[in-house]
Structure formats: structure tokens, C-alpha cells
Image (spheres, rainbow, N blue to C red):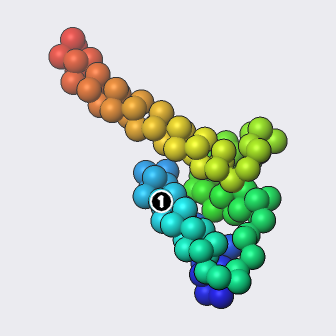
Amino acid sequence: SSLLGKILYFKFGKESSQVGLKIDEFELAVREHDDVPGNEPIGKNVLRTVCINGMPEPLLSHLQLHAYAFADWTAVLAAAKAYVKIKVDNNTAAATAAPAALALS
């Protein structure tokens, strides 16, 4: 089906900032596929590979480096969410610290 193709070639965005919304879209597509009567569930290893390989850099390299640690595709997505959250938190901290650092000069 075209939904299966969408899942197998899914991309989670061109930048890490897009990953969160794309994860929701991916999970919905997998649920929709699995809910269709007669559809075989997509293999967990296939979904795991799609989740890793569909990520943008530098998240892709990070996930590939730690791929051995992910039991299934949901673990990959949890790691991707954590990575993006840390990156956003670090960017926010840097942005709020920058004016203070400038004021000292």
C-alpha cells in the first residue's frame, strides 16, 4: 500500500528541530497501517532501521553510533526525542546567557 511506502521511506525532517512533529506523524502512520484489516504488522527491526536512517544529521550519526542499545523502534524514537530536547534546552540556555555575557564586557 502507499501507506507502507510512506513508512518505509519516512524522513524525520532536514533539521533536528523538525523531528518531534515528524515522530508524531510517523507513529500515526504506523498505527494506521497496523489497524487496516489484513495488513501484516511491519517488522520491529525494519521499523528500527527506518527510524534511525530517516533522521537528519547530526542526530543520524548519534543514533547509528548507539544503534546496538535500541531494543526496538520505540527506543530509537525515545532517544531522538531526548536528543532534540537536550539540544533545544542547550540552545535556550545559550541564548539567555548571551545577553548577560555581553553586559559584562
Point 45% across, 38% down: residue: 85
Point 21% across, 11% down: residue: 104
Side (left or right) of 40 relative to 83: right
Report which quarter residue 41 is drawn in.
bottom right
Q: Position of residue 57 (x, y in %)?
A: 59, 52
Q: Residues within 10 Å of mark 1 (few under 14, many from 20)?
A: few
Side (left or right) of 98 relative to 72: left
Residue 62 appears in the rendering = yes
Point 64% across, 50% down: residue: 74
- Give the farthest residue toward the top: 104
Q: Position of residue 9 (x, y in %)?
A: 65, 74
Q: Position of residue 84 (x, y in %)?
A: 49, 42
Image quarter hosting the N terminus: bottom right
User: Which structural element holds mark 1?
Assistant: helix
> Compared with residue 8, is residue 100 higher up or lower down, i.e. above or below?
above
Name the residue type under label 1: Asp
Residue 7 appears in the rendering = no
- Give the farthest residue toward the bottom: 1
Report which quarter residue 31 is drawn in.
bottom right
Report which quarter residue 90 is drawn in.
top left
Would you name the residue on which mark 1 appears?
Answer: 24
Point 77% across, 44% down: residue: 71
Please state which of residues 87 and 46 is positioned toward the viewer in this rendering: 46
